[in-house]
Image (cartoon, rainbow, N blue to C red):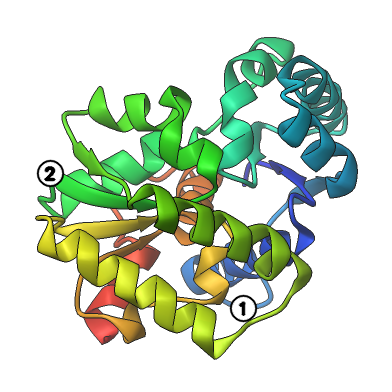
Amino acid sequence: MKTIGILGGMSWESTVTYYKVINELVRGRLGGLHSAQIVLRSLDFEEIERCQSSGDWARAAEILAEAARGLEAAGADVILIATNTMHKVAPEVARAVTVPLLHIAEATGAALARRGIRKVGLLGTKYTMTEAFYKCRLEAQNFDVLIPSPEDINLVNRVIFDELCLGTIRPESKAEFLRIIEDLRRRGAEGVILGCTEIGLLVTQEDTDLPVFDTTLIHAEEAVRFALGESSDETKDTNDTTAEKA
């Protein structure tokens, strides 16, 4: 089993999900008392968010790159950035280490392709929804990406930072997210990407019959495949399994 290195804490709410799901998947694959070999570096999200809001992505890249080098030095065979938004600095992080970095948008694109979906809605922070670093990764894989209206982009972003990253789950916010998902469906979305690792705390496949692609689950699944040396066709997606149960 290879060792998974996780850059977490952005926010720690979703890092908990990564840790739990990865270990559950390893135990499910190997049985017995097996658990994942993980090296975790949990960053102070306050510092990272200040970099985001001020536009100091160069400093954010330095912080994550340094942390990634620490994970590699501690024995990580692969690196995960446990947040969608901070994949804006994924190229800098990847250049800082010699082990692979598993890109969350690449893993999500592969999951979409396995389900035969080509037109998809994207929810996430305002950076993820509006900037090229994430959408272009999906468009390069021949996906048509839809995002909410400007007003709803602001709403989704506010709920992520002011509620979900603080562990606050509000029924009224869930209702708004489901309304936005239905609007994306009306515009032709065949599925929706939960493109922020906290959104899965609020909305799951059980809440809608539109296929939901939870990037946290997809990313965790990809990490386990790498750690156990599995190919993508050897196992069923965690995300797909969730969808089929709904």
Please state the horizontal and vertical placement of residue 12, each as a whole percent of the image: 78, 60
130, 118: nearer the viewer? 130
Is 17 placed above or below 90 here? Answer: below
Which residue type does callout 1 highlight?
Answer: Gly
- Residue bearing the label numbered 1: 32
Left or right: 46 in relation to 171: right
Residue 118: give its label. Answer: 2
43, 241: nearer the viewer? 43
The part of the image, by quadrant, that contains residue 34 is bottom right
The part of the image, by quadrant, that contains residue 205 is bottom left
Which residue type does callout 2 highlight?
Answer: Arg
- Cα separation, mark 2 vs mark 1, equals 39 Å
Residue occupying image coordinates x 66% and y 10%: 95
Please state the horizontal and vertical placement of residue 198, each as a whole percent of the image: 59, 63
Mark 2–mark 1 CB contact (< 8 Å): no
Residue occupying image coordinates x 21% and y 50%: 120
Q: How packed is label 2: few (under 14 Cα within 10 Å), some, or many (20 or more)?
A: some
Please, what secondary structure does the residue beneath circle 1 have? Answer: loop
Left or right: 49 in relation to 204: right
The part of the image, by quadrant, that contains residue 189 is bottom left
Is 179 placed above or below 245 here? Answer: above
Residue 94: give its label. Answer: none
Mark in the foreground, 2 or 1: 2
